[in-house]
Image (cartoon, rainbow, N blue to C red):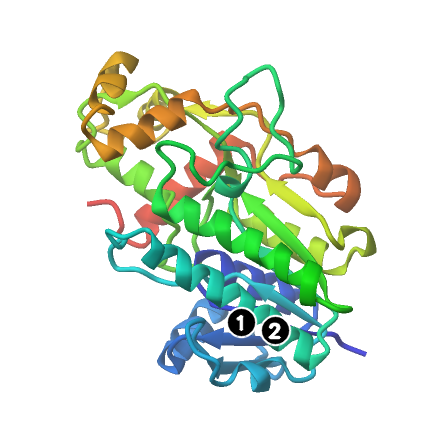
């Protein structure tokens, strides 16, 4: 009998998950903040090879409200909690970013428990795991947690961290038989199925449009969106995944100057404005004394990018589809395809 999966949201990651689930023959339910987005999602799936939609159903449901969640989860075996509360601008008071994220995941877990769902897989974030490990000789693993009071931690990263903590606390105290897993991706890049891209594409946009006059020597970890989707589905079905966190990252790391060099070498037609200058670290450290963005930059400079993806490989048999360079170039191809490069 076909299993039924609810996917919350159909953004950059969500639509890749929906596509892979349909390709594997699952019954898929999708929650949208506005049902008016439904046609766009269907068009995106059609343009990526889906021809039959009999096993796809949409519900209008918002993370900030109880309405329709019980109905959306009725008959579901699994829930993939991908969507996050949306902000047009990050609130000045970080509590206004944290509260909706925490309330949203707790709402999902309560509704899933009430509906008899077997397992919820939450899309968390590497910000919940690795921003407090400053020792490059020690690999960051799923056993690590970011300190919520870490200097330079952005409101977004903090909201994901505290939402995941709240989720585990709920499972521990009120979860009953509900199984729970988190996926903690690093910067998500790779091919987009539509013009909707992840926030991580902002790094590439700022490089390409020339607004980054000098490039900070900040190392990054990257993961292909197709690998993130694959990891969610593996975590959903593998019996050994219950109660676990999984870091989603390609092997190794890549620095921003290395990304700039890659773009100039492989995509010269769109990389004409990419700066060849590197910003000295001392400039970021000096700026951090009075600038919030520089303070976040200092944290990115200091944190270890020695990130382990061994757990996902060992327990889930996961093998990243793309390396760092391939994921970045696939992102650029999508930006060209959907007119996101000016």
Residue 197 vertical position relative to residue 70 in the rendered view, above or below: above
Mark 1 to mark 2: distance in Å?
5 Å
Picture residue at 40% right of the left edge, 75% below the top: 33
Tell me: 205 left or right of 21.
Answer: left
Give the quadrant of residue 87.
Answer: bottom left
Q: Secondary structure at mark 1?
A: helix
The residue that disc 1 covers is: 107
Q: Position of residue 20 (x, y in %)?
A: 61, 61
Quarter of the rendering occupied by the N terminus: bottom right
Q: Secondary structure at mark 2?
A: helix
Give the camera-side residue of 168 and 15: 168
Residue 266 vertical position relative to residue 158 in the rendered view, above or below: above
Tell me: 142 left or right of 342.
Answer: right
**Cβ atoms at labels 1 and 2 below 8 Å apart:** yes
Give the camera-side residue of 79 and 194: 79
Q: How many marks?
A: 2
Picture residue at 71% right of the left edge, 74% below the top: 117
Tell me: 115 left or right of 63.
Answer: right
Give the camera-side residue of 283 and 41: 283
Q: Position of residue 160 (x, y in %)?
A: 47, 50
Residue 33 vertical position relative to residue 300 in the rendered view, above or below: below
User: In this rendering, does residue 212 appear at all?
Assistant: yes
Tell me: 148 left or right of 248.
Answer: left
The residue that disc 2 covers is: 110
């Amino acid at each position: 009998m076909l299993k039924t999966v609810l996917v919350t949201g159909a953004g950059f990651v969500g639509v890749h998950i929906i596509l892979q689930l349909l390709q594997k023959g699952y019954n898929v339910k999708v929650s949208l903040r506005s049902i008016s987005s439904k046609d766009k999602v269907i068009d995106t799936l059609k343009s990526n090879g889906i021809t039959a939609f009999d096993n796809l159903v949409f519900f209008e449901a918002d993370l900030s409200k109880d309405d329709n969640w019980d109905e959306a989860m009725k008959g579901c075996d699994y829930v993939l909690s991908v969507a996050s509360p949306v902000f047009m601008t990050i609130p000045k008071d970080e509590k206004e970013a944290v509260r909706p994220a925490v309330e949203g995941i707790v709402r999902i877990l309560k509704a899933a428990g009430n509906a008899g769902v077997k397992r919820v897989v939450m899309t968390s974030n590497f910000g919940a795991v690795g921003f407090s490990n400053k020792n490059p000789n020690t690999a960051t693993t799923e056993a690590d947690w970011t300190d919520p009071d870490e200097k330079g931690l952005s409101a977004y990263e903090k909201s994901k961290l505290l939402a995941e903590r709240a989720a585990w606390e709920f499972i521990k105290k009120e979860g009953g038989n509900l199984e729970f897993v988190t996926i903690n991706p690093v910067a998500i890049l790779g091919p987009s199925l539509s013009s909707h891209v992840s926030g991580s594409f902002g790094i590439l946009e700022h490089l390409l449009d020339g607004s980054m006059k000098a490039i900070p020597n900040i190392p990054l970890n990257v993961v292909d969106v197709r690998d993130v989707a694959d990891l969610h589905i593996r975590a959903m079905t593998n019996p050994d995944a219950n109660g676990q966190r999984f870091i989603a990252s390609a092997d190794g790391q890549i620095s921003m100057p290395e990304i700039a060099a890659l773009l100039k070498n492989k995509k010269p037609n769109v990389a004409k404005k990419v700066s060849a200058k590197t910003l000295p670290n001392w400039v970021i450290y000096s700026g951090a004394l009075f600038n919030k963005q520089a303070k976040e930059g200092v944290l990115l400079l200091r944190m270890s990018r020695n990130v382990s993806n061994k757990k996902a490989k060992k327990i889930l048999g996961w093998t990243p589809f793309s390396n760092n360079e391939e994921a970045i170039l696939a992102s650029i191809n999508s930006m060209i395809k959907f007119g996101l490069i000016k």
